[in-house]
Amino acid sequence: METIKHIDDTYVAKTYKRFPVEIVSGEGSVCYGSDGKRYIDMGSGIGVTAFGIADPVWQRAVTEQLSKVQHMSNLYYTAPCAYLAKSLCEKTGMKRVFFSNSGAEANECAIKVARKYAYDKKGITDPVIVTLQNSFHGRTHTTLAATGQAHFHELFQPLTPGFTYLAAGDTEGLTKLCEDSRIAAILIECVQGEGGVNKLSEDFVRAIASVCAEKDILLMVDEVQTGNGRTGTLYAYEQYGISPDVVSTAKGLGGGLPIGATLLSDKVKDTLAFGEHGSTFGGNPVAAAGALSIVERLTPDFLDGVRRKGEHIRARLVGQSGIRSVSGLGLMVGIETEKPVGEVLAFCMEKGVLCLSAKTKLRLLPALNIPDEILDEALDVILEAVRV
Ligand SMILES: *Cc1c(COP(=O)(O)O)cnc(C)c1O
Protein backbone atom coordinates (compact mmCIF):
# COMPACT_ATOMS: atom_id res chain seq x y z
CA MET A 1 0.00 0.00 0.00
CA GLU A 2 2.79 2.47 0.93
CA THR A 3 4.38 1.89 -2.46
CA ILE A 4 1.14 2.20 -4.41
CA LYS A 5 0.21 5.31 -2.46
CA HIS A 6 3.64 6.79 -3.10
CA ILE A 7 3.67 5.99 -6.81
CA ASP A 8 0.11 7.27 -7.28
CA ASP A 9 0.78 10.42 -5.26
CA THR A 10 3.87 11.04 -7.38
CA TYR A 11 2.59 10.31 -10.86
CA VAL A 12 -1.19 10.69 -10.97
CA ALA A 13 -2.55 14.20 -11.52
CA LYS A 14 -3.48 15.67 -8.19
CA THR A 15 -7.18 16.17 -8.89
CA TYR A 16 -8.44 13.60 -6.37
CA LYS A 17 -8.09 13.60 -2.63
CA ARG A 18 -7.91 9.88 -1.88
CA PHE A 19 -8.44 8.06 1.39
CA PRO A 20 -5.29 6.14 2.40
CA VAL A 21 -6.78 2.80 1.39
CA GLU A 22 -5.94 0.61 -1.59
CA ILE A 23 -8.79 -1.66 -2.64
CA VAL A 24 -7.54 -4.86 -4.23
CA SER A 25 -10.58 -7.13 -4.55
CA GLY A 26 -14.19 -7.59 -3.65
CA GLU A 27 -17.36 -9.58 -3.99
CA GLY A 28 -20.81 -8.00 -4.12
CA SER A 29 -21.09 -5.34 -1.41
CA VAL A 30 -17.86 -6.28 0.33
CA CYS A 31 -14.33 -5.33 -0.69
CA TYR A 32 -10.86 -5.79 0.69
CA GLY A 33 -7.93 -3.46 1.24
CA SER A 34 -4.33 -4.41 0.44
CA ASP A 35 -3.85 -5.03 4.19
CA GLY A 36 -6.65 -7.62 4.12
CA LYS A 37 -9.15 -5.36 5.88
CA ARG A 38 -12.80 -6.01 5.00
CA TYR A 39 -15.02 -3.09 4.00
CA ILE A 40 -18.72 -2.85 3.27
CA ASP A 41 -19.12 -0.78 0.12
CA MET A 42 -21.93 1.75 0.60
CA GLY A 43 -20.80 3.89 -2.35
CA SER A 44 -20.58 1.44 -5.28
CA GLY A 45 -17.91 3.51 -6.97
CA ILE A 46 -20.36 6.45 -6.84
CA GLY A 47 -23.37 4.50 -7.97
CA VAL A 48 -21.56 2.55 -10.67
CA THR A 49 -21.30 -1.08 -9.57
CA ALA A 50 -25.07 -1.53 -9.59
CA PHE A 51 -24.93 -5.26 -8.83
CA GLY A 52 -21.84 -5.09 -6.67
CA ILE A 53 -18.18 -5.80 -7.19
CA ALA A 54 -17.18 -8.62 -9.54
CA ASP A 55 -20.87 -9.44 -10.06
CA PRO A 56 -20.80 -12.87 -11.77
CA VAL A 57 -23.67 -12.25 -14.24
CA TRP A 58 -22.14 -8.99 -15.45
CA GLN A 59 -18.69 -10.60 -15.47
CA ARG A 60 -19.91 -13.43 -17.71
CA ALA A 61 -21.55 -11.01 -20.14
CA VAL A 62 -18.39 -8.92 -20.32
CA THR A 63 -15.90 -11.79 -20.63
CA GLU A 64 -17.98 -13.60 -23.25
CA GLN A 65 -17.94 -10.47 -25.38
CA LEU A 66 -14.24 -9.91 -24.61
CA SER A 67 -13.39 -13.26 -26.13
CA LYS A 68 -15.23 -12.34 -29.35
CA VAL A 69 -14.35 -8.75 -30.20
CA GLN A 70 -13.39 -6.01 -27.73
CA HIS A 71 -13.94 -3.04 -30.02
CA MET A 72 -14.94 -2.09 -33.53
CA SER A 73 -15.32 1.36 -34.90
CA ASN A 74 -18.81 2.77 -35.33
CA LEU A 75 -18.39 2.13 -39.05
CA TYR A 76 -19.71 -1.40 -38.43
CA TYR A 77 -22.56 -3.06 -36.56
CA THR A 78 -22.00 -4.98 -33.32
CA ALA A 79 -24.76 -6.87 -31.52
CA PRO A 80 -24.45 -5.65 -27.88
CA CYS A 81 -24.87 -2.01 -28.87
CA ALA A 82 -27.97 -2.79 -30.95
CA TYR A 83 -29.57 -4.98 -28.27
CA LEU A 84 -28.82 -2.48 -25.51
CA ALA A 85 -30.42 0.37 -27.47
CA LYS A 86 -33.47 -1.83 -28.19
CA SER A 87 -33.81 -2.81 -24.56
CA LEU A 88 -33.54 0.78 -23.30
CA CYS A 89 -36.11 1.98 -25.84
CA GLU A 90 -38.55 -0.85 -25.13
CA LYS A 91 -38.34 -0.25 -21.39
CA THR A 92 -38.77 3.54 -21.60
CA GLY A 93 -40.73 4.30 -24.76
CA MET A 94 -37.84 6.40 -26.03
CA LYS A 95 -37.04 5.91 -29.73
CA ARG A 96 -33.28 6.02 -30.21
CA VAL A 97 -30.10 6.04 -28.13
CA PHE A 98 -26.74 7.72 -28.63
CA PHE A 99 -23.94 5.92 -26.78
CA SER A 100 -20.88 7.60 -25.29
CA ASN A 101 -18.53 6.83 -22.41
CA SER A 102 -19.50 8.92 -19.41
CA GLY A 103 -22.19 11.01 -17.81
CA ALA A 104 -20.64 14.26 -18.96
CA GLU A 105 -20.61 13.04 -22.54
CA ALA A 106 -24.21 11.86 -22.29
CA ASN A 107 -25.09 15.43 -21.27
CA GLU A 108 -22.93 16.92 -24.03
CA CYS A 109 -25.07 15.00 -26.50
CA ALA A 110 -28.27 16.25 -24.82
CA ILE A 111 -27.00 19.83 -25.09
CA LYS A 112 -26.17 19.41 -28.78
CA VAL A 113 -29.63 17.95 -29.39
CA ALA A 114 -31.24 20.93 -27.63
CA ARG A 115 -29.30 23.46 -29.67
CA LYS A 116 -29.88 21.72 -32.98
CA TYR A 117 -33.59 21.25 -32.26
CA ALA A 118 -33.99 24.93 -31.40
CA TYR A 119 -32.36 25.89 -34.66
CA ASP A 120 -34.21 23.36 -36.83
CA LYS A 121 -37.59 24.00 -35.30
CA LYS A 122 -37.54 27.69 -34.41
CA GLY A 123 -34.53 29.13 -36.18
CA ILE A 124 -32.92 30.09 -32.87
CA THR A 125 -29.22 30.82 -33.28
CA ASP A 126 -28.47 31.86 -29.69
CA PRO A 127 -30.29 29.20 -27.67
CA VAL A 128 -30.33 29.15 -23.88
CA ILE A 129 -30.63 26.03 -21.74
CA VAL A 130 -32.08 26.33 -18.24
CA THR A 131 -30.45 24.24 -15.52
CA LEU A 132 -30.97 24.39 -11.77
CA GLN A 133 -28.89 26.05 -9.12
CA ASN A 134 -26.90 23.48 -7.19
CA SER A 135 -27.07 21.00 -10.09
CA PHE A 136 -24.21 18.85 -11.31
CA HIS A 137 -23.90 17.81 -14.94
CA GLY A 138 -20.23 16.92 -15.42
CA ARG A 139 -16.65 18.11 -15.76
CA THR A 140 -16.20 18.74 -19.46
CA HIS A 141 -16.08 22.40 -20.22
CA THR A 142 -19.66 22.66 -21.48
CA THR A 143 -21.21 20.45 -18.78
CA LEU A 144 -19.32 22.55 -16.26
CA ALA A 145 -21.16 25.55 -17.70
CA ALA A 146 -24.41 23.57 -17.35
CA THR A 147 -23.59 22.86 -13.70
CA GLY A 148 -25.34 25.49 -11.57
CA GLN A 149 -22.61 25.95 -8.96
CA ALA A 150 -20.47 29.06 -9.25
CA HIS A 151 -17.44 27.59 -7.48
CA PHE A 152 -17.00 25.07 -10.32
CA HIS A 153 -16.92 27.94 -12.80
CA GLU A 154 -14.52 30.42 -11.26
CA LEU A 155 -11.20 29.09 -12.50
CA PHE A 156 -12.27 28.10 -15.99
CA GLN A 157 -13.62 31.22 -17.60
CA PRO A 158 -14.75 31.93 -20.22
CA LEU A 159 -17.32 29.14 -20.09
CA THR A 160 -19.55 27.92 -22.89
CA PRO A 161 -22.34 30.50 -23.13
CA GLY A 162 -26.04 29.68 -23.32
CA PHE A 163 -26.92 28.50 -19.83
CA THR A 164 -29.03 30.12 -17.17
CA TYR A 165 -29.72 28.87 -13.67
CA LEU A 166 -33.01 28.64 -11.86
CA ALA A 167 -33.52 27.92 -8.15
CA ALA A 168 -35.13 24.52 -7.52
CA GLY A 169 -38.76 25.09 -6.60
CA ASP A 170 -38.96 28.59 -8.09
CA THR A 171 -42.09 28.14 -10.20
CA GLU A 172 -42.60 31.87 -10.60
CA GLY A 173 -39.04 32.34 -11.85
CA LEU A 174 -39.59 29.44 -14.23
CA THR A 175 -42.58 31.11 -15.84
CA LYS A 176 -40.73 34.37 -16.17
CA LEU A 177 -37.61 32.74 -17.65
CA CYS A 178 -39.59 30.85 -20.23
CA GLU A 179 -41.04 34.05 -21.66
CA ASP A 180 -37.64 34.36 -23.35
CA SER A 181 -38.07 32.79 -26.79
CA ARG A 182 -34.42 31.68 -26.83
CA ILE A 183 -35.05 29.02 -24.16
CA ALA A 184 -34.37 25.73 -25.93
CA ALA A 185 -34.43 23.21 -23.10
CA ILE A 186 -34.67 22.69 -19.37
CA LEU A 187 -32.24 20.14 -17.91
CA ILE A 188 -32.92 18.74 -14.44
CA GLU A 189 -31.85 15.99 -12.06
CA CYS A 190 -34.96 14.62 -10.29
CA VAL A 191 -32.74 14.12 -7.26
CA GLN A 192 -29.68 16.38 -7.23
CA GLY A 193 -26.90 13.97 -6.34
CA GLU A 194 -23.65 15.90 -5.97
CA GLY A 195 -25.66 18.93 -4.87
CA GLY A 196 -26.65 17.18 -1.62
CA VAL A 197 -29.17 14.43 -2.51
CA ASN A 198 -32.03 16.92 -2.86
CA LYS A 199 -35.23 15.56 -4.36
CA LEU A 200 -37.16 17.99 -6.52
CA SER A 201 -40.79 18.47 -5.55
CA GLU A 202 -43.43 16.89 -7.76
CA ASP A 203 -45.21 20.22 -8.21
CA PHE A 204 -42.07 21.91 -9.47
CA VAL A 205 -41.19 19.09 -11.89
CA ARG A 206 -44.76 19.07 -13.21
CA ALA A 207 -44.62 22.84 -13.67
CA ILE A 208 -41.42 22.40 -15.70
CA ALA A 209 -43.01 19.66 -17.81
CA SER A 210 -46.04 21.80 -18.46
CA VAL A 211 -44.14 24.93 -19.54
CA CYS A 212 -41.94 22.71 -21.77
CA ALA A 213 -45.01 21.22 -23.45
CA GLU A 214 -46.67 24.60 -23.84
CA LYS A 215 -43.66 26.34 -25.42
CA ASP A 216 -42.03 23.43 -27.25
CA ILE A 217 -39.03 23.61 -24.93
CA LEU A 218 -37.19 20.29 -24.57
CA LEU A 219 -37.55 18.60 -21.21
CA MET A 220 -34.22 16.91 -20.53
CA VAL A 221 -33.55 14.76 -17.46
CA ASP A 222 -30.04 13.99 -16.26
CA GLU A 223 -30.37 10.46 -14.90
CA VAL A 224 -26.64 9.82 -14.70
CA GLN A 225 -26.85 9.15 -10.96
CA THR A 226 -30.60 8.58 -10.44
CA GLY A 227 -31.01 6.19 -13.35
CA ASN A 228 -30.80 2.46 -13.91
CA GLY A 229 -32.78 1.36 -10.87
CA ARG A 230 -31.04 3.57 -8.32
CA THR A 231 -34.18 5.30 -7.08
CA GLY A 232 -36.45 2.24 -7.25
CA THR A 233 -37.74 2.69 -10.79
CA LEU A 234 -35.73 2.20 -13.97
CA TYR A 235 -35.47 5.99 -14.23
CA ALA A 236 -36.41 8.48 -11.53
CA TYR A 237 -38.56 10.60 -13.88
CA GLU A 238 -41.11 7.77 -13.96
CA GLN A 239 -41.98 8.60 -10.35
CA TYR A 240 -42.92 12.13 -11.44
CA GLY A 241 -45.28 11.03 -14.20
CA ILE A 242 -43.45 13.07 -16.84
CA SER A 243 -42.33 12.15 -20.37
CA PRO A 244 -38.93 13.74 -21.03
CA ASP A 245 -37.73 14.50 -24.55
CA VAL A 246 -34.15 13.57 -23.69
CA VAL A 247 -32.73 11.42 -20.90
CA SER A 248 -29.00 11.16 -20.23
CA THR A 249 -27.55 8.37 -18.16
CA ALA A 250 -24.27 6.64 -17.29
CA LYS A 251 -22.81 5.54 -13.89
CA GLY A 252 -24.80 2.40 -12.93
CA LEU A 253 -25.71 1.60 -16.53
CA GLY A 254 -22.33 0.02 -17.23
CA GLY A 255 -22.09 -1.88 -13.96
CA GLY A 256 -18.44 -0.85 -13.75
CA LEU A 257 -17.31 -0.21 -17.32
CA PRO A 258 -17.51 3.27 -18.83
CA ILE A 259 -20.64 3.93 -20.84
CA GLY A 260 -22.95 6.89 -21.34
CA ALA A 261 -26.31 6.90 -23.05
CA THR A 262 -28.54 9.68 -24.30
CA LEU A 263 -32.10 8.49 -24.84
CA LEU A 264 -34.05 10.37 -27.49
CA SER A 265 -37.82 10.61 -27.69
CA ASP A 266 -39.81 10.56 -30.91
CA LYS A 267 -39.60 14.36 -31.11
CA VAL A 268 -35.79 14.47 -31.26
CA LYS A 269 -34.85 10.98 -32.41
CA ASP A 270 -33.51 12.24 -35.73
CA THR A 271 -32.37 15.71 -34.63
CA LEU A 272 -28.71 14.73 -34.89
CA ALA A 273 -28.02 13.44 -38.39
CA PHE A 274 -25.09 11.60 -40.00
CA GLY A 275 -21.81 13.15 -39.00
CA GLU A 276 -23.28 15.57 -36.47
CA HIS A 277 -22.15 13.61 -33.42
CA GLY A 278 -19.90 10.66 -32.68
CA SER A 279 -17.62 8.87 -30.27
CA THR A 280 -14.80 6.42 -30.99
CA PHE A 281 -15.61 4.24 -27.99
CA GLY A 282 -19.35 4.94 -27.93
CA GLY A 283 -21.36 1.70 -27.95
CA ASN A 284 -18.23 -0.34 -27.26
CA PRO A 285 -19.34 -4.00 -27.41
CA VAL A 286 -17.79 -5.03 -24.08
CA ALA A 287 -19.28 -2.10 -22.14
CA ALA A 288 -22.61 -2.57 -23.94
CA ALA A 289 -22.72 -6.32 -23.21
CA GLY A 290 -22.16 -5.58 -19.53
CA ALA A 291 -24.79 -2.84 -19.56
CA LEU A 292 -27.33 -5.12 -21.22
CA SER A 293 -26.82 -7.64 -18.42
CA ILE A 294 -27.61 -4.87 -15.92
CA VAL A 295 -30.65 -3.41 -17.67
CA GLU A 296 -32.23 -6.83 -18.22
CA ARG A 297 -32.13 -7.56 -14.50
CA LEU A 298 -33.89 -4.31 -13.54
CA THR A 299 -37.29 -6.00 -13.59
CA PRO A 300 -40.35 -4.66 -11.71
CA ASP A 301 -39.81 -7.30 -8.99
CA PHE A 302 -36.17 -6.38 -8.57
CA LEU A 303 -37.04 -2.67 -8.43
CA ASP A 304 -39.60 -3.42 -5.69
CA GLY A 305 -36.66 -4.80 -3.72
CA VAL A 306 -34.67 -1.60 -4.29
CA ARG A 307 -37.55 0.49 -2.95
CA ARG A 308 -37.97 -1.86 0.03
CA LYS A 309 -34.27 -1.57 0.90
CA GLY A 310 -34.51 2.22 0.58
CA GLU A 311 -37.48 2.27 2.95
CA HIS A 312 -35.62 0.02 5.37
CA ILE A 313 -32.65 2.42 5.44
CA ARG A 314 -34.96 5.37 6.12
CA ALA A 315 -36.85 3.49 8.83
CA ARG A 316 -33.59 2.74 10.61
CA LEU A 317 -32.13 6.24 10.31
CA VAL A 318 -34.94 8.77 10.67
CA GLY A 319 -35.16 10.24 14.16
CA GLN A 320 -32.00 8.57 15.46
CA SER A 321 -29.39 10.40 17.53
CA GLY A 322 -27.20 12.75 15.52
CA ILE A 323 -29.40 12.63 12.40
CA ARG A 324 -31.14 15.86 11.44
CA SER A 325 -32.80 14.66 8.25
CA VAL A 326 -32.73 11.94 5.62
CA SER A 327 -33.25 12.84 1.95
CA GLY A 328 -33.24 11.15 -1.44
CA LEU A 329 -35.18 8.40 -3.16
CA GLY A 330 -34.79 4.61 -3.18
CA LEU A 331 -31.16 3.62 -2.73
CA MET A 332 -29.96 7.18 -3.16
CA VAL A 333 -29.76 8.43 0.42
CA GLY A 334 -28.56 11.73 1.89
CA ILE A 335 -28.11 12.06 5.64
CA GLU A 336 -27.80 15.41 7.34
CA THR A 337 -25.74 14.75 10.47
CA GLU A 338 -24.99 16.85 13.52
CA LYS A 339 -21.32 15.88 13.36
CA PRO A 340 -19.19 17.17 10.47
CA VAL A 341 -19.47 14.68 7.61
CA GLY A 342 -15.68 14.25 7.39
CA GLU A 343 -15.64 12.94 10.92
CA VAL A 344 -18.46 10.49 10.16
CA LEU A 345 -16.74 9.23 7.00
CA ALA A 346 -13.48 8.66 8.86
CA PHE A 347 -15.20 6.76 11.69
CA CYS A 348 -17.08 4.55 9.22
CA MET A 349 -13.93 3.80 7.27
CA GLU A 350 -12.09 2.89 10.46
CA LYS A 351 -14.94 0.49 11.29
CA GLY A 352 -14.90 -0.99 7.77
CA VAL A 353 -17.73 0.86 6.03
CA LEU A 354 -17.08 2.95 2.90
CA CYS A 355 -19.54 5.84 2.58
CA LEU A 356 -19.72 8.97 0.42
CA SER A 357 -20.49 12.58 1.06
CA ALA A 358 -22.46 15.13 -0.96
CA LYS A 359 -21.81 18.70 0.14
CA THR A 360 -22.27 18.56 3.93
CA LYS A 361 -24.32 15.35 3.90
CA LEU A 362 -23.39 11.73 4.26
CA ARG A 363 -24.44 9.95 1.06
CA LEU A 364 -25.19 6.27 0.58
CA LEU A 365 -25.38 4.61 -2.85
CA PRO A 366 -25.10 0.90 -2.03
CA ALA A 367 -25.32 -1.82 -4.66
CA LEU A 368 -28.94 -2.34 -5.69
CA ASN A 369 -28.74 -5.98 -4.58
CA ILE A 370 -26.95 -5.41 -1.25
CA PRO A 371 -27.95 -8.31 1.03
CA ASP A 372 -30.17 -7.19 3.94
CA GLU A 373 -27.77 -8.48 6.62
CA ILE A 374 -24.79 -6.61 5.14
CA LEU A 375 -26.92 -3.48 4.82
CA ASP A 376 -27.89 -3.75 8.50
CA GLU A 377 -24.28 -4.30 9.51
CA ALA A 378 -23.33 -1.07 7.71
CA LEU A 379 -26.27 0.83 9.19
CA ASP A 380 -25.21 -0.24 12.70
CA VAL A 381 -21.82 1.37 12.08
CA ILE A 382 -23.33 4.49 10.53
CA LEU A 383 -25.69 4.95 13.49
CA GLU A 384 -22.75 4.61 15.84
CA ALA A 385 -20.73 7.08 13.77
CA VAL A 386 -23.35 9.83 13.77
CA ARG A 387 -24.53 9.38 17.39
CA VAL A 388 -24.07 12.45 19.62
C1 LIG B 1 -21.66 11.87 -12.04
C2 LIG B 1 -22.61 12.76 -12.72
C3 LIG B 1 -22.31 13.33 -13.97
C4 LIG B 1 -20.96 13.19 -14.62
O1 LIG B 1 -20.70 11.86 -14.98
P1 LIG B 1 -19.21 11.45 -15.42
O2 LIG B 1 -19.36 10.01 -15.80
O3 LIG B 1 -18.33 11.67 -14.24
O4 LIG B 1 -18.84 12.30 -16.55
C5 LIG B 1 -23.29 14.09 -14.60
N1 LIG B 1 -24.48 14.27 -14.04
C6 LIG B 1 -24.82 13.74 -12.84
C7 LIG B 1 -26.18 13.97 -12.28
C8 LIG B 1 -23.89 12.97 -12.14
O5 LIG B 1 -24.20 12.48 -10.94
Image (cartoon, rainbow, N blue to C red):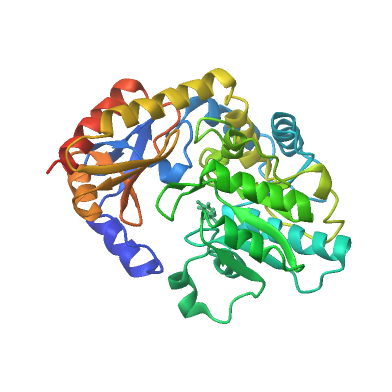
The image quarter containing residue 7 is bottom left
Q: Looking at the image, which residue is at 87% across and 56% down?
A: 274
| In the rendered image, the vertical position of residue 98 relative to residue 310, given as above or below | below
Whether residue 1 appears in this view of the structure is: no
- Visible residue check, residue 365: yes
Residue pictured at 77% horizontal, 67% vertical:
181
Quick check: 251 left or right of 78? left
Residue visible at 46% across and 42% down?
47
221 or 39, nearer to the observer = 221
Judging depth in this view, the residue of 215 and 260 nearest the camera is 215
Q: Quadrant of the C terminus?
A: top left
Residue 355 horizontal side relative to residue 252, left or right: left
Between 238 and 268, the one lying in front of the other is 238
Horizontal and vertical percent for residue 196? 40, 52
Along the viewing direction, whichever of 150 and 241 lies nearer the viewer? 241
Furthest residue in direction bottom, as rendered? 158
Q: Position of residue 219 (x, y in %)?
A: 69, 51
In the figure, 165 relative to 253: above or below?
below
Q: Residue at x 41, y 69 (%)?
A: 13
Residue furthest out toward the top: 301
Extreme residue toward the front, this view:
172
Residue 310, image quadrant:
top left
Residue 387 image point, x, y percent: 14, 41
